[in-house]
Image (tube, grey):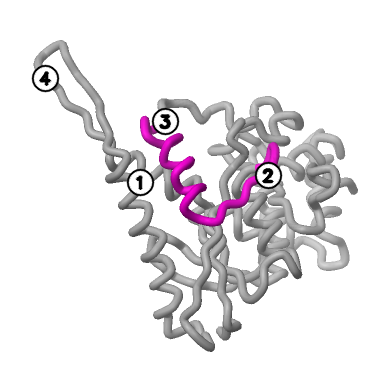
Amino acid sequence: MRCSSLTTLLIDADGVTYRCAAAVQKHIRWDDDIYTSHADLKEAQNAFTAAIEGLRERVAADPGIQMFDEEVDVILCFSCPSRRYFRHDLLPTYKATRKGERPMVLSDLNAWASEVYETKTKPHLEADDVLGILATHPTLIKGDKIIVSIDKDMQQIAGLHMNPMDGEVFRVREEFAENFLWTQVLTGDTSDNYTGLPGCGPVKAKKILSSDPLFSPEDLVLAAYQKSGLTLEDMTTQVNVARILTATTYDFKNKEPILWQM
């Protein structure tokens, strides 16, 4: 694959800062009754810098990417710091199962990273949405863009992607991206706590989506929902919770998503 003179890594920074903050947190048991935890912010900062620069170097050195030069820019994409997203208004139980204590230096690490690197965030959006919007906008960022995320949901977005864990760069095609979205609407996502079509796994979803080439994916999905006693309203909620925003599904003027309607 060939890239232009400027390649920008759009990085899901939520995941990187979380991993770096968690990695430096230490727990000590002093005796039978006393335990303490501590973390070194500077150590977390160094780990974060190494991770970001490592991603930069991997792209510049990737033999599968033909670049005119080795210029690789970086933009960090963060979720809205309020942690209250528009999906909560559509489905109050969204991500309700995600509980637990956050790493103690995470907030400070996020603040530091936002000062050191170019950062993007939008009100009530998650980092995934910011990535999707920037990756699909034709003029906001010049050159080629590579989405860097371990979140499988990002495969709804066509274009270049990079797995930050192994450095693999791959291209997601439009047809695959659309099919991935409708598969998610059918199977749901337990980690994000939305159900999709109850009882529908990947095998059944594939069967539904390939059942009749004369009908669109949304028609096939709606028919499956209605066959199970669910409604268009039920399906609409699941689509809008599952769907990652893009430049065409975000209202820049009012700073809000353009919700899907059939």
The span shown in magenta is 103-125
**In this view of the protein, which residue sits in the foreground, 34 or 182?**
34
Q: CA distance from mark 2 to mark 4?
A: 44 Å
Q: CA distance from mark 2 to mark 1?
A: 23 Å
The residue singled out by tag 1 in the image is 20
Is 222 left, or right, of 2 in this rendering?
Answer: right
Q: Is residue 156 magenta?
A: no
Q: Please give the name of the residue rendered at 58% of the width and 77% of the height, measured from the top-left corner.
A: 6
Query: Which of the two discs, 2 and 3, sits closer to the camera?
Result: 2
Query: Which of the two discs, 2 and 4, sits closer to the camera?
Result: 2
Q: Amino acid at mark 2?
A: Lys
As drawn, 224 above or below 51: above
Q: Is residue 73 visible?
A: yes
Q: Amino acid at mark 3?
A: Arg
N-terminal-most mark, 4 or 3: 4
- Label 3 secondary element: loop
Q: Please give the name of the residue rendered at 42% of the width and 46% of the height, measured from the top-left corner.
A: 17
The residue singled out by tag 3 in the image is 102
User: Residue 32 is drawn in which quadrant?
Assistant: top left
Q: Residues within 10 Å of mark 1 (few under 14, many from 20)?
A: many
Residue 38's spot in the image, x, y percent? 25, 29
Q: Please give the name of the residue rendered at 40% of the width and 72% of the height, measured from the top-left corner.
A: 58
The residue singled out by tag 4 in the image is 30
Q: Is residue 227 visible?
A: no
Dots 2 and 3: beta carbons under 8 Å? no
Q: CA distance from mark 2 to mark 3?
A: 22 Å
The residue singled out by tag 2 in the image is 122
Residue 92's spot in the image, x, y percent? 69, 25
**In this view of the protein, which residue sits in the foreground, 102 or 193?**
102
